[in-house]
Structures are given as structure tokens and as C-alpha cells.
Image: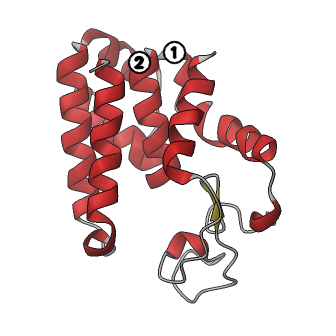
Amino acid sequence: MSAFDQAFEQVLGVEGGLSMDPQDKGNWTGGEVGSGELKGTKYGISAAAFPHIDIPNISLAGAKLLAYNCYWAPIRGDQMPPGIAAAVFDMAYNQGIVQAAKTLQHACGATPDGAVGPDTIARLNATPLKVLMKNITTERILVYSSLAMWPAYKRSWTDRSINALIVALGV
């Protein structure tokens, strides 16, 4: 199984089936609660990120293709150690590519410009795995805790962050 396949399976463990929570801005095509059409999220593919997609009817294969092209490739997952790639991919899925890249860049001491490039890859490879994952997990929870939806999702977002840490470290 490829690193992408493993990361996608990890995300599916959290993102699974169709969610039509009207209080989740990701479920709305306008990206805000009550803005646009409530189409939901399925397999982590959200109406906010993909307003033109028929979310309730997207296939698993279709979601996987979008995940690879729209999240894995932009974060350069194939150039990272698998555990780090899975954690950054999960962040990209849940927080967006730019925020995931900035979180990784803060964690490894790269310039936080929101785009994973050669300098970010070099710095993450030069940072010990335990230090990098501790930093990523801390940065990730700090971002989550600054969001308006933190009170509603703090448990699941914290669990998601810690699970990525555990998987990456093989604990």
C-alpha cells in the first residue's frame, strides 16, 4: 500500500460518510453557515471546498482522486516520510492546504509562506521525527483552538491531532 493510500485510509477513519451538519461551515457551498447550498461533506470532500461537486453522490474513487490531486500533490506528500505526509495530508484535508503548509513550516523552522517547497522539505527532513511531530501537533491544536467552532469540535479535533502523532511515531 502506498503512503498516499495509507494516509487516505487514515483520513477516512475520521471523515467517513455523509455529514449534513448545518452548523458546519464546510457543509455549505458558500463556506459559511447559511451561505449557499447545504450539500454536506462526504469522505472529507466538502461543499465549501468543492461547491460544484454533488457531495451526497460522490463515489469513494472520486473522492480519492480529488484527495490526491487537491491535497496530497500540493503538499508534496510523496517527498515526505510517510507518517509526516499522513499528518500534513490530514491537516490539508481538514484545515486547507495553506494552513497545513504553514503549520508544517512553523514546526520545522521554515518560512511560513503556505506553500510546501524544497526548503520546507529539506527542513522537515533535517528535523528529528519526534520533535517534528510534537511541533506539528502543538501547532495544529493551537490553530484549531483559535477557530470559532472549537467549542463544538475540540474533542474530535484534538483526538484527530493526537491520532496523527501516534500513527506517525508508530506508537
Give the residue drawn at x 80%, y 45%. 62
Seen in the picture, residue 58 relative to 73 is either above or below; the reply is below
The picture places residue 148, in percent across and down from the top left corner, at: 30, 75
For residue 50, side relative to residue 31 (left or right)? right
The picture places residue 33, in percent across and down from the top left corner, at: 51, 84
Q: Is residue 113 visible?
A: no
Figure colour scheme = secondary structure
Q: Amino acid at mark 1?
A: Gln
The residue tagged 2 is 121
In the drawing, what numbered circle is on residue 79?
Answer: 1
Give the residue drawn at x 61%, y 77%. 28
Out of 103 and 90, give the one closest to the viewer.
90
Q: Residues within 10 Å of mark 2 (few under 14, many from 20)?
A: many
Which of labels 1 and 2 is toward the front?
1
Q: Give SS at disc 2.
A: helix
Give the residue drawn at x 54%, y 78%. 21
Callout 1 touching callout 2 (CB < 8 Å): yes
For residue 27, side relative to residue 164 (left or right)? right
Q: Amino acid at mark 2?
A: Ile
Seen in the picture, residue 143 relative to 139 is either above or below; the reply is below
Out of 62 and 122, give the one closest to the viewer.
62
The picture places residue 100, in percent across and down from the top left corner, at: 41, 43
Q: Quadrant of the C terminus?
A: top left
First along the sequence among labels 1 and 2: 1
State the image quarter where residue 47 is shown. bottom right
Seen in the picture, residue 86 relative to 70 is either above or below; the reply is above
